[in-house]
Image: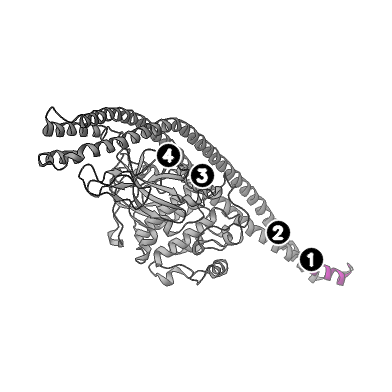
Amino acid sequence: MKSCPKCGERYGDDRQFCFVDGVTLESLKDARLGTAIAGRYVLEDIIGEGGMAMVYRARHKVVDQPFAIKVMNPLLARDPIVRERFRREAKSAKKIAHPNIIEIFEEGDTSDGTAYMVMEFLEGSSLADIISKGPIPVKRAVGLMIQIARGIARAHDLGVIHRDLKPENIFVCRREPSHPRSNGSSKKDGGGPVGSIDAVTDDEVPAISDAPDTIPPGDLVKLLDFGIALSKQDSRLTGTGELFGTPQYMAPERITSTEAGAPSDLYALGVIFFEMLTGRLPYDAPDVATFFVRHLKDPPLPIRSIQPNTPESLADLIERLLAKEPNQRPVDAHKVTADLIDVAREIGAPVPPEPQVDPASSRPMALPASERGTHRWVRRADVFAEMLERVYGKSAPPELRAKLDRISELAARVAKIRARSVAEQNKLEEIGKKGREGRLRLGHAVDALGADASRAREELRASEEKLATARKRQELARKQFLETHKSITYWEGRSGFAEPYEDLMNAYRDAADVIEGWLEARKQDRSLEQAVETHQQSVRDLEFQLTKLRESLAMHELDTEAEREAIEGLVGQLTHEIDEADHELVTLAGSLVEPLRSRPELGALFRQLEAA
């Protein structure tokens, strides 16, 4: 694939010069650049590259909106496990539908069988790049932390565990001022340029607006790369002994067990939060093995010894997140979010908008696919006709007249096909809108149930801790009774039940006191057992409701995909017809204008041609 360095027109490899301005064509640096994915997304530039995939900036052929498209490395395409992980990344992120998780619009295979996914286009910086400039001021950091925790809470509620949380997989965009109930500006997230993120001091963090319908500017977090995410509904890709993730952020149980769950993501959050505030990791090690040992055995450095201005409440939260035992960490990401919001209010930092009212929850609707560009070749045909008229009058050479007639015929055909494609694309946009609205509606219901379940888990944990304490008291009373019983046995032996002993009386009294305490502990034990059972039932009920919501979401996705598939097939067919006609038109146009390029009287018309 080649392109014109002046006007940007794309050509096949067989062309040497641009028919519009005559300059020499240049080969594109990537064979996919200039081609269309799914017949609709034209790849414009490379914006990211990794071992598994290449990420391109793309623009829709008929909807004027940028996208990011991740295309799998063709060398890995034959590996069914890798392909399935790539597919699952798209499926996992797509169903979450949360303002703090990158949005996936569709996924599929290219014409050569390579997997791809279409994502929202983001501009900004990774959290890793921001941290590389130094510690993040506390007020800004807490706002970022809240959004990270919210995104993970939604993922966990939907049964998705990330398993590779790290600053490189967290992207920070710049949130523009907007109104939560409007569709907002397209410069917010993924809809267009948002600028790069520079260091911000606490003094520069925007204050919370008094107006309830206005959201101030600030950071917008997007969690990325669910490629090794574990789905509770699909554990087929987690083989025995497999270890995925990044050692610096890996929870102890991830190192020793393949059964690690949601708490392992919370541990990674603790590492990330520590790094955000200090600019360094809680553990330093020269190699992977040493990282593992330190995660398993060493206590992390107290964060306030490195960053003294860290609020005690935040330092305590990070310490709990970094607990070696999963059951010593917060009960879930909802609890982490709630604690972070308390910290934000304590230090006067702005709290990011709730997902339900966040404009980032509702991607700015693309303008309906317009017919802009539909008549491009029709306008060019008119220019070609005027060129021949100026040079030859009514006596144009037959071969040039035949080419012009064919161009006019093809241009009319392309305009007709493109108009139909626009109509079908608008149907796809409506299906996409309906699908997304359904995901958001179910997602908000998941949030509400997830928060209730979090409170129930917190109450259950508190009851279990009280029960454990009561049982320790009961065990202590039992041991004390055994000791007093030894004393009773001793003095009973001394007395032989022949005469009263004061020591025997005291031993009986001590035993009675111990048994009284033991009985009281047992009563409290039974009461707490009932409380634990009640809280367990509450958690089970709420988790059952979450399961039903997940099932509803899965059915919604199946219905949406079924609607999309038929129309996408038709759009792909129409696009193929347009591409074939375009290729013939470029060839005809090149041969038509070549003998006319040296004519000075046509300079203005060539400029019109470029504009067309």
Q: Amino acid at mark 1?
A: His
Identify the residue at image location x=53%, y=58%: 329
Q: Is residue 487 magenta?
A: yes
Identify the residue at image location x=15%, y=34%: 387
Q: Which mark is residue 328?
A: none
Q: Up-down: is 228 above or below 307?
A: above
**Which is nearer the N-term, disc 2 or disc 1?**
1
| Residue labelled with disc 4 | 440
Q: Amino acid at mark 4?
A: Leu
Q: Which mark is residue 485?
A: 1
| Separation (CA) of disc 4 from disc 1 | 66 Å
Name the one closer to the observer, 96 or 305.
96
| Separation (CA) of disc 4 from disc 2 | 54 Å
Q: Rate crowding at label 3 as few (under 14), some (14 to 19) or many (20 or more) other CA atoms within 10 Å.
A: many
| Separation (CA) of disc 4 from disc 3 | 13 Å
Model colouring: one colour
**Which is nearer the N-term, disc 4 or disc 1?**
4
Segment tinted magenta in the rendering: 486-496
Q: Is residue 261 magenta?
A: no
Secondary structure type for disc 4: helix
Q: Position of residue 518 (x, y in %)?
A: 70, 59
**Which is nearer the N-term, disc 4 or disc 2?**
4
Secondary structure type for disc 2: helix
Q: Quadrant of residue 326?
A: bottom right
Mark closer to the observer (2, 3): 3
**Which is nearer the N-term, disc 2 or disc 3?**
3
| Residue labelled with disc 2 | 518
Secondary structure type for disc 3: loop
Q: Position of residue 145 (x, y in %)?
A: 41, 56
Q: Amino acid at mark 3?
A: Leu
| Residue labelled with disc 3 | 158
